[in-house]
Image (cartoon, rainbow, N blue to C red):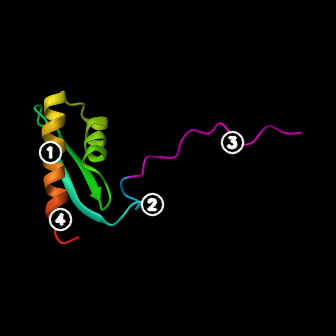
Amino acid sequence: GGPGGDASAGPPPDTRETSPDPARGPRLFCLEYEGDDGQVTAVIVHQGDSAEEVTRRVCARSPLEPPLRRALCQRVQDELSKRRGTG
């Protein structure tokens, strides 16, 4: 027997944002959040995403204080309901 396979290979390069995820709905809009440090965090919002989910994605990249999280979540909610429209 030779050496084992590549079972312990690391994760593939991070291409999740660029490749469409079939499990999620069509892309609705791109949310850009600018933090106090001027760092812009952009997350793609898909149909079917909840405001909480989008907020979590932003916080994963740019941790926010609870009041800011709530404000962001509200803003996402507004955008989602605008786009739902007649739904």
Q: Of residues 2 and 84, which is closer to you in this image?
A: 84
User: In front here: 49 or 30?
Assistant: 49
In percent of the image, x 20 and y 31: which residue is there? 64
Q: Which residue is mark 2?
A: 23
- Circle on res. 6: 3
Residue depicted at 23% across the width and 70% down the height:
87
Percent x, y for residue 5?
A: 74, 42
Task: Work out which residue is located at the far bottom of the displayed protein and give it.
Answer: 86
Residue at disc 2, secondary structure: loop
Specify which label sits upstream in the sequence, 1 or 3.
3
* 56 relative to 5 in the view: left or right: left
Please name the amino acid that badge 2 sits on: Ala
Q: Nearer the viewer, residue 30 or 38?
A: 30
Q: Which badge, 3 or 4, comes first in the chain's sequence?
A: 3
Q: Is residue 7 magenta?
A: yes
Q: Secondary structure at mark 1?
A: helix
Local packing at callout 3 (Cα closer than 10 Å; few below 14, some 14-19, many 20+) is: few
Residue 83 disc label: 4
Three-letter amino acid code of the residue under disc 4: Arg
Q: At label 3, which amino acid type do we have?
A: Asp
Q: Are marks 1 and 3 in contact (CB under 8 Å)?
A: no
Find the magenta span and give its range.
1-16
